[in-house]
Amino acid sequence: MVNSHKALWGKCLDLIRENVTEQQFKTWFAPIVFESFSASTNTLLLQVPSHYAYEYLEQYYVGLLNKVLARCFGANVVLRYRIVTDQEHHLTQEVDAEQPADIEPPRAARANQAPTTLDAAVPQGLNPQLNPRHTFSNFIEGDSNKLPRTVGISIAEHPGKSTFNPFFIYGPSGCGKTHLVNAIGVRCKELYPQKRVLYVSARLFQVQFTDAVRQNRVNDFINFYQTIDMLIVDDIQEWATAVKTLDTFFHIFNHLFRNGKQIILASDRPPVDLQGMKDRLLTRFSCGLIAELEKPNVQLCVDILNSKCRRDGLKIPTDVITFIASTANGSVRDLEGVINSLLAYSVVYNCNIDMRLAERVIKRAVKIDNRPLTVDDILEKVCAHFNVTTQNVFSRSRKRDYVLTRQISMYFAQKYTKMPASRIGQLIGNRDHSTVIHSCSTIEKRLKVDKAFVEEMNSIENAFRLKK
Ligand SMILES: Nc1ncnc2c1ncn2[C@@H]1O[C@H](COP(=O)(O)OP(=O)(O)OP(=O)(O)O)[C@@H](O)[C@H]1O
């Protein structure tokens, strides 16, 4: 049976070959591996060599694929991809294909000619990868986000036309950057359905780029991104050391900018603090509008909570809302977590949500820890903050994040444990006392001149007091 299904896939390939150029066939279809066909679910599973290949197939060839699959496997066949995400470690991820849509293959495919860079630039039916739940209507306005929100609406209404291009949003974690940039994309799509809007995280962009390099398809990659009308890139601080990704983005950026396409960038820090990025890119990031999303104040937290309760039909007394808002430490994500825990407790214990329950939940969710801090406690929190491991910190690597985590851990260890520098050095990667002294003075100097860094250090220190 497997063989007959495999043979059917072979037939599909024959049909596809008749409809695309040899080069397109070799590039996109020959590397696909037939995995299985489940008769019970009528599902065909195909392995594709990378996320980029999957996206390209879905972008450009989904119509053709659906037609040939329907011809060979029957009308209701469901296509599922197994994407190889890490060849070295044989990691894969499975996703369903888009449902059949009337998407035409690229012009070159139809004309049966070799693809040109122009042909790659005529794709239809782009999935914008936006989160439809993140809209302006549920992005609550307050003092800390009034400007970025207002500008965001204006950009969505006149993409690429205003002086707010690029629009650079920065702010601490959980304060609504991803929500806001999504809302801009969602509104733009509502107003201009034909516009090619794309949301992509910096990390995904980098993975796609690395795959494209590996497969010798960098031109396709660049051509694809140059077709976008509104490009939204989230968390671009993650590119700080990705030199080649940045160079490629530089070309894409210039092309889009020159052609009046809208670029929106989100980061946890302003351009001036994006160390590692070249000036030519930073000046471009800064030539539109840079707007800060600050931590929400208590009033905004109250408004957000009230809105969430209205939307989800929850009844939470005002004093409880105010109490939760004042414990949130400026992260809306934390607020949402507390509400979800409250709900769970009220259901499990079958009780109303009142102050007693709120205090109990918050105490459990966010417990104050009075034990003296150890170097291990400090390392754990600082590593968690920068999303690195202690092995990274202990290593000899000079990677920016590792060095910073190491220096900050040494600084806090000296501040909180009062251990001698030599002992701190021993415990943090077996470094000598001069490294510890140098690290502490580097951090102290930066604290004197860098406001955002002071805030970041404060938030790490807050985490020391809180024990989950
Ligand atoms: N003003 C707001 N109104 C309503 N919800 C908000 C607001 N700000 C943030 N949120 C909600 O808070 C949560 C966290 O927001 P979001 O993911 O956008 O933060 P972020 O700044 O991108 O964080 P990170 O940098 O960690 O990715 C989301 O569920 C978002 O919907």
Image (tube, grey):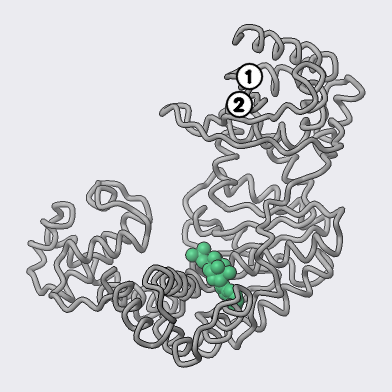
In the displayed structure, 132 sits above or below 111; it is below
In the displayed structure, 176 sits above or below 209; it is below
Point 88% across, 19% down: residue:
112
Residue 65 position by quadrant: top right
Q: Which mark is residue 48?
A: 2
Image coordinates of residue 343 in percent, x first then y, are 45, 72
Q: Callout 2: helix, strand or loop?
A: strand
Observer able to see residue 38: yes
Q: Nearer the viewer, residue 285 or 353?
A: 353
Q: Amino acid at mark 2?
A: Val
Q: Which residue lies under the disc numbered 1?
A: 31
Point 85% across, 31% down: residue:
106
In the displayed structure, 347 sits above or below 455; it is above
Near mark 2 (Cα within 10 A), the count class, few <14, some 14-19 or many ≥20, is many
Q: Amino acid at mark 1?
A: Pro
User: Of marks 2 and 1, which one's residue comes earlier in the chain?
Assistant: 1
**Quarter containing the N terminus:** top right
Observer able to see residue 270: no
Spatial CA distance of label 2 from label 1 is 7 Å
Q: Callout 1: helix, strand or loop?
A: loop
Cβ of mark 1 under 8 A from ligand 1: no
Question: In the shown orientation, is residue 287 left or right of residue 65?
Answer: left
Q: Nearer the viewer, residue 225 or 246?
A: 225
> Quick one: which residue is furthest to the front in this view?
350
Q: Nearer the viewer, residue 342 or 448?
A: 342
Of the four image quadrants, the one with ligand 1 is bottom right
Image coordinates of residue 146 in percent, x first then y, are 65, 84
**Mark 2 near mark 1, Cβ–Cβ under 8 Å?**
yes
